[in-house]
Image: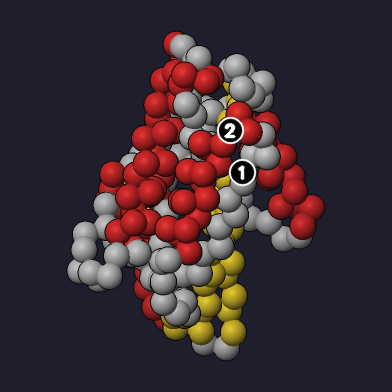
């Protein structure tokens, strides 16, 4: 879909969400694979001088797990992110729509780099610019110190891409220097969950 999507903050659940996205309940691995297939088919790709099937957007898949045990409700969230690679315009020779996409990709990756740099700063009071791009704003809750992050950085073995590979390695070094602290449990009583649902239903009726 080419529809513009905005990121909102849910005051009730104290979390970010994107109105208009599809949320689907899955009960087995086959259900997950089916949704991944749909997402893969919807992903935008395009050709330029370097890559015939270049990703023209970042991919974010969020899996939310809810478990009820006795009078407690435990919530967990797993974000799977596939970042589109940065592009050197002098190599891809992108024009028109491809050029516009490349600028947006590079801008959001630059914003992510600034966030990583701020998180790795010894000055813990330093402002972290999560709102500089939709990508970093969406990932705020998994980079704010209450989560665990694992990142894989891919580099090219081709000498032609040496500069890009060095940039990727330096970015990986910056990421490795970040200490987010210990992940926190997200547990609420069933009564609180019920009250939140009631508030959300009333808010929907008012709107």
Image coordinates of residue 114 in percent, x first then y, are 32, 50
Residue 69 vertical placement versus 79 (above, below): below
Quadrant position of residue 200: bottom left
Marks 1 & 2, CB-CB < 8 Å contact: yes
Mark 2 highlights which residue? 161
Image coordinates of residue 196 in percent, x first then y, are 37, 69
Marker disc for residue 24: none
Q: On the rendered structure, is 73 left or right of 157?
A: left
- What's the residue at 53%, 19% (across, down)? 92
Q: Compute the Cα span from label 1 to label 2.
A: 8 Å
Mark 1: give few (<14), some (14-19) or many (20+) Cα within 10 Å: some
Q: Earlier in the sequence, mark 1 or mark 2?
A: 1
Residue 122 vertical placement versus 94 (above, below): below
Q: Nearer the viewer, residue 128 or 88?
A: 88
- What's the residue at 29%, 65% (across, down)? 121
Residue 160 vertical placement versus 31 (above, below): above
- What's the residue at 52%, 87% (across, down)? 71
Mark 1 highlights which residue? 155
Secondary structure of the residue carrying tag 1 is loop
Mark 2: give few (<14), some (14-19) or many (20+) Cα within 10 Å: few
Image coordinates of residue 69 in percent, x first then y, are 59, 84
């Amino acid at each position: 879909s080419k529809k513009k999507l905005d990121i909102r903050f849910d005051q009730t659940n104290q979390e970010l969400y994107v109105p208009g996205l599809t949320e689907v309940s899955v009960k087995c691995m086959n259900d997950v694979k089916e949704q991944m297939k749909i997402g893969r088919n919807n992903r935008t790709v395009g050709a330029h001088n370097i890559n015939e099937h270049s990703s023209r957007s970042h991919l974010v898949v969020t899996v939310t797990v809810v478990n009820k045990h006795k009078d407690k409700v435990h919530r967990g969230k797993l974000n799977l992110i596939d970042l589109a690679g940065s592009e050197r315009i002098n190599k891809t020779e992108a024009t028109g729509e491809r050029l516009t996409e490349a600028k947006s990709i590079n801008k959001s990756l630059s914003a992510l780099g600034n966030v990583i740099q701020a998180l790795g700063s010894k000055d813990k009071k330093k402002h972290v610019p999560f709102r500089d791009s939709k990508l970093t704003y969406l990932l705020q809750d998994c980079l704010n110190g209450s989560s665990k992050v694992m990142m894989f950085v891919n580099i090219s073995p081709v000498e032609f891409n040496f500069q890009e590979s060095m940039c990727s390695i330096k970015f990986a070094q910056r990421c490795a220097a970040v200490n987010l602290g210990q992940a926190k449990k997200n547990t609420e009583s069933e009564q609180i969950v019920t009250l939140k649902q009631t508030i959300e239903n009333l808010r929907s009726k008012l709107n």
